[in-house]
Structures are given as C-alpha cells and as structure tokens.
C-alpha cells in the first residue's frame, strides 16, 4: 500500500523559511510526478509546485521565486524549500504523487503557519 509521509511543517515568522519533505513507500512503481498542494481555511486546494521524474517543474505564480521543489528519485522523496514566507502561505500542505499505472496519492497533510 502506497504511503506518503510528510514532515517539516511548523510555525515561522514572516520572512522565515521552512523545508517540507515527503517520502513515498510501499508499492511504488514508475513515478510520473511528485509535488505539493496546499489548502487554506475556507479555500480550495491549490497546486503549489510539481516536478516530473524527468526534472521539469512548475510553480504557482504566488510562490515563484520564493519556493523551490526538488526530488531524490532514488529515495522516492520530494522536498519543498520555502523562503520569504508570508502570512498568506499559511495552509495545510499536502504531498502528491502520480503513478500513471496506479493513479494519484495524497499525504496526510502538514500544517504551515506563518505569523506576521
């Protein structure tokens, strides 16, 4: 059974940094993409950043230039380095994994809170 284990969330002041990690295990076959979504209270879940196994990445306009996604394919792990955090970045961040042969999977979510 596929499991996504996230870590690295927490409370930080505006302007600070956090690094999220997500490790995938169990029944992992060819991974097509891994990335991060977030959901703030009373808002829809939105894409933050995504990276394909080939190395192509995409970002939400709201985080471009501040967040960096990276992957360790050998460890089936994806990271999200978040710099210059703003209060509007406060949300639950969810890890996402796509395997074309098995579908999409989500992590349990990790809270990121940015205080002003």
Image (tube, helix red, strand yellow):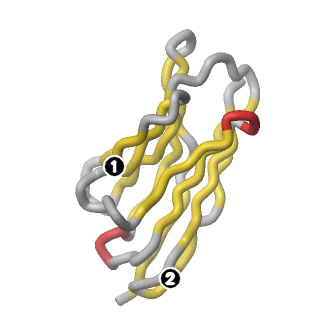
Query: Would residue 82 be found to the left or right of residue 28 on screen?
Result: left
- Which mark, residue 30? none
Quadrant location of the C terminus in the rendered image: bottom left
Judge by depth and name the residue closer to the eye, 66 or 112. Answer: 66
Quadrant location of the N terminus in the rendered image: top right
Judge by depth and name the residue closer to the eye, 15 or 95. Answer: 15
Q: Measure how far apart labels 1 and 2 are at the Cα level.
A: 22 Å
Query: Would residue 50 be found to the left or right of residue 107 on screen?
Result: left
**For the residues carrying marks 1 and 2, which lies nearer the camera in this image?**
1
Residue depicted at x 50% and y 18%: 103
Q: Position of residue 64 (x, y in %)?
A: 31, 59
Q: Position of residue 101 (x, y in %)?
A: 55, 10
Q: Position of residue 87 (x, y in %)?
A: 33, 78
**Disc 1 and disc 2 in contact, CB within 8 angstroms:** no
- In this rendering, the answer to whether 33 lies above or below 44 is above
* Mark 1 residue crowding within 10 angstroms, few (<14) / some (14–19) / many (20+): some
Q: Position of residue 37 (x, y in %)?
A: 40, 47
Q: Which residue is mark 1?
A: 59
Q: Which residue is mark 2?
A: 12
């Amino acid at each position: 059974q596929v499991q996504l284990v996230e870590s690295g969330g927490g409370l930080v002041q505006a302007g600070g940094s956090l690094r999220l990690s997500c490790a995938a295990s169990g029944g992992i076959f060819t991974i097509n993409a891994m990335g991060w979504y977030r959901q703030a209270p009373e808002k829809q879940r939105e894409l933050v950043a995504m990276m394909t196994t080939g190395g192509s990445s995409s970002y939400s306009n709201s985080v471009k230039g501040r967040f960096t996604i990276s992957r360790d394919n050998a460890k089936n792990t994806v990271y999200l380095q978040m710099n210059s955090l703003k209060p509007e970045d406060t949300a639950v961040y969810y890890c996402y994994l796509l395997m074309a042969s098995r579908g999409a999977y989500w992590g349990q979510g990790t809270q990121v809170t940015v205080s002003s």
